Image (cartoon, rainbow, N blue to C red):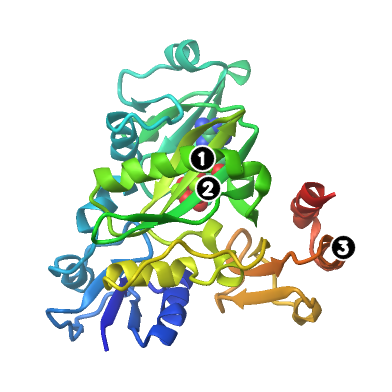
Amino acid sequence: STKVWVLGNGQLGAMLAHAGKPLALDVRPIDIMVPTDEKLPLAADDIITAEREQWPESALSLQLSTHANFINGPVFGRLADRFTQKSLLDELKVATAPWEPVDDKSDETTLHSRYGDRVLLKRRTGGYDGRGQHWLKQAEDSKIPADWRNLAIAEQAINFDEEVSLVGARGQDGKCYFYPLTLNLHQDGILMASIAPLSRLAPLQTQAEEMLSTIMHGLNYVGVMAMECFRLGDKLLVNELAPRVHNSGHWTQAGCHIDQFQLHLRALCNLPLHRPQVNFQCVMVNLIGIDKDDRWLSLPNAELFWYNKEVRPGRKVGHLNLSVHNRVHLADSINQLKLWMPQQYQAPLDWIMAEFF
Ligand code: ATP
Ligand code: MG
Ligand code: MG
């Protein structure tokens, strides 16, 4: 059977392997963080993908990343660096938050005059879950950290109405397929919850699909890509891109006939693609820095994905997909979760309720 090697063995790699099973695809996530002299038994017709945008260079990672079938190879580095990612968006004329690189000549006054009294500095590489961000606030006279120069970009603070994302895939024949837009709630830079699909977001679907199509065609991309956006009225601005399966697409595991993991594998292996059918509306709640609680399994509309990682504050350790066949049943489950979950979940759980009542 076809072998698909995955650079990285976190939860995304594990869920890719899980999704490969019914297609008899042999998906092998590889831990590229441990130094080893071991060589992988790669065959010429194996397929290579990645669950992350960046990895340390080692004999092991080079073996995978230099393989002729490392799909989208050049894209990872390009999107892993916010400078080249934002430059790409500008070149393709896809709307994104106004920005510029931070270099030796950058100064706070000029940045505030260009972008306003709040400017967000983002490290060019390595940031995730809101790590690697630094706010410049004019009122507080905050400064550019010296060791961020030439390693960061400055972005205008966007007063968005809300955050949405689009997950889609491009096949080897260049055809694109999309899930409905997902509504996302971030708290302190980390995704807490998602809801999809939502009829009120349907009017934005075509705009979003055109943006992500332009990007995927521009990169000659194959597989699943995620586009995080800010919604300002009826306009979308791209926040960032991920050349991989994405947390905001986890709801598709419960809600769609082909989930994002299987869609990615199908595209990589040149298997037939379809517009994924939505079976039902879903709510996804991320489990962050909390211990597993088997009471969650007593919720009749919940599916638990537990990543079996060491629990640490701020770390994603699982997610719950709740089906929304009936909003009263959803409310019952959300109210239970409010009783069982710690303080930082109260606002996200209220946010979910507010969407339905
Ligand atoms: P991820 O885990 O999604 O990769 P990240 O660390 O790469 O996150 P971003 O997605 O760039 O970081 O930002 C995280 C969150 O910070 C966004 O989802 C949004 O809530 C907020 N944010 C980012 N950029 C801006 C901006 N220009 N203006 C206002 N808020 C922003
Ligand atoms: Mg990111
Ligand atoms: Mg993000």
On screen, residue 146 above or below 117: below
Give me the residue at 56% from left, 71% from top: 253
Quadrant containing the N terminus is bottom left
Give me the residue at 55% from left, 49% from top: 181
Secondary element under disc 1, as helix, strand or loop, is strand
Q: Is residue 266 left or right of residue 203?
A: left
- The circle drawn on residue 165 is 2
- The circle drawn on residue 264 is none
- Please report contact status of discs 1 and 2: CB closer than 8 Å, yes or no: yes
- The x and y percentages for residue 56 are 28, 62
The mark nearer the N terminus, 1 or 2, is 2
Give me the residue at 58% from left, 62% from top: 315
Question: Disc 3 marks which residue?
Answer: 328
Where on the picture, by quarter, is residue 160? top right
Q: Tell me the kind of residue under disc 3.
A: Val
Q: Is residue 347 left or right of residue 156?
A: right
User: Alpha-carbon neighbours of circle 2 within 10 Å: few (<14), some, or many (≥20)?
Assistant: many
Where on the picture, by quarter, is residue 240? top left
On screen, residue 5 above or below 66: below
The mark nearer the N terminus, 3 or 2, is 2
Secondary element under disc 2, as helix, strand or loop, is strand
Q: Nearer the viewer, residue 80 or 241?
A: 241
- The x and y percentages for residue 146 are 39, 30
Could one spot residue 300 in this view of the protein?
Answer: yes
Q: Tell me the kind of residue under disc 2.
A: Ser
Secondary element under disc 3, as helix, strand or loop, is helix
- The circle drawn on residue 229 is 1
Gap in angstroms between the C-alphas marked 3 and 2 = 26 Å
Q: Tell me the kind of residue under disc 1.
A: Cys
Gap in angstroms between the C-alphas marked 1 and 2 = 6 Å
Q: Nearer the viewer, mark 3 or mark 2?
A: 3
